[in-house]
Amino acid sequence: MWKEEISDVNENSEHLEKILKDINNLKALGCDIIRFAVPDAESAKSLRIIQSHTDVPLVADIHFDYRLALTCLDESLPGTAVAAIRINPGNIGSRERVEAVVNACEAHNALIRIGVNSGSIPHDLEEKVLDGSLSRSDALCEAALREVEIFNELNFSNVVVSMKASSVEETIKSNEAFALVSDIPLHIGVTEAGPLITGVVKSTLAFSHLLKEGIGSTIRVSLSSSPENEVITAREILHECGLRKGGVSLVSCPRCGRMGFDVHGFMNRWQNKLLSLDKEITVAVMGCVVNGPGEGKHADLGIAGGGGKAILFRHGKILKTIDEKDADIEFEKELMKL
């Protein structure tokens, strides 16, 4: 989810240049889709301009005003129609308004993502949750099925469903329940998952469970952190679940009494650069020369150090010994050789 306002974007704005740079950085880290909040008409027009400058599919997040979805798809405006619209049919009004959005999406082969969360459960289902006759996860599933039925009646099948809760258990159970009765693709995520560590833990538990069951076509890691951290977390979850191949695999030491090399500072400088490389290699950043080449002997390139010196090694074999102050320069030289 994009975390900045976009209402002031135009073809010649510095803001557009910055957004496109940020999109490319996220793409390099493994991001495949980006969702933008569209709270007003200017943001809708801006999003069309942004989409015309990138091949990353953009999703317009629409609430309440169906006309914003139509603006994002309006061919009479500059730019390119967005790839998808995220709506909750229940909060944009009449059947005619939903049908207008569907017709516009059909005309542009745009996808609609139905978004349901614990805050948008219909009143009658919420009452059952409160009296204990229905679980919240089943209520989420039922709410999503009701929304889907509207599109079935309109013969529109280019739909993805998302049911998100802040609870790992509710996220898992609602998606499992929906997958039992429908083959509509699911976008999975734990919403409002919290800060970095809390959010990573919740997302990993929910996603690894669902993905191993074959549930989930796209994922969103929701963190009170940077978009880069969200993308990196999603990428690594997919990688460890065996669902995403290639890219750089990073190995690095935790803190320990033998540490003689600034592993954490080095990783902070190099993590995003390395993960952006389109290379299937392993890089090890180790804290001491005692264990570095041994524990990192599987690495295509490794660095370790101590006492103001650092070593660069490949598959356990030391390539060179350098001053630690030259670590970044010499590391980059060896990296380029790969």
Image (tube, grey):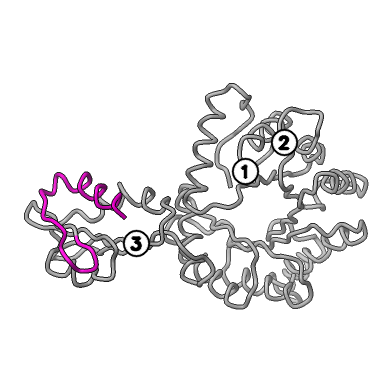
Looking at the rendered structure, the kind of residue marked 2 is: Thr
How packed mark 1 is, by other alpha carbons closer than 10 Å (few <14, some 14-19, many 20 or more), is: some
Q: Quadrant of the C terminus?
A: bottom left
Per the image, label 2 sits on a secondary structure element best described as loop
Judge depth for marks 1 and 3 and give the one in front.
1
Q: Are marks 1 and 3 in contact (CB under 8 Å)?
A: no
- Would you say residue 316 sits in the magenta stretch? yes
Looking at the rendered structure, the kind of residue marked 1 is: Asp
| Residue 166 occupies quadrant | bottom right
Would you name the residue on which mark 2 appears? 80
For image coordinates 16% across by 56% down, the residue present is 261
Looking at the rendered structure, the kind of residue marked 3 is: Leu
For image coordinates 75% across by 37% down, the residue present is 72
Q: Is residue 137 above or below residue 285?
A: below
Would you name the residue on which mark 3 appears? 250
Q: Is residue 306 left or right of residue 37?
A: left
In the displayed orientation, state which residue is furthest to the front. 337
For image coordinates 68% across by 38% down, the residue present is 38
Per the image, label 3 sits on a secondary structure element best described as strand
| Gap in angstroms between the C-alphas marked 2 and 1 | 11 Å
How packed mark 3 is, by other alpha carbons closer than 10 Å (few <14, some 14-19, many 20 or more), is: some
The mark that comes first in sequence, 1 or 3, is: 1
The part of the chain drawn in magenta is: 313-338
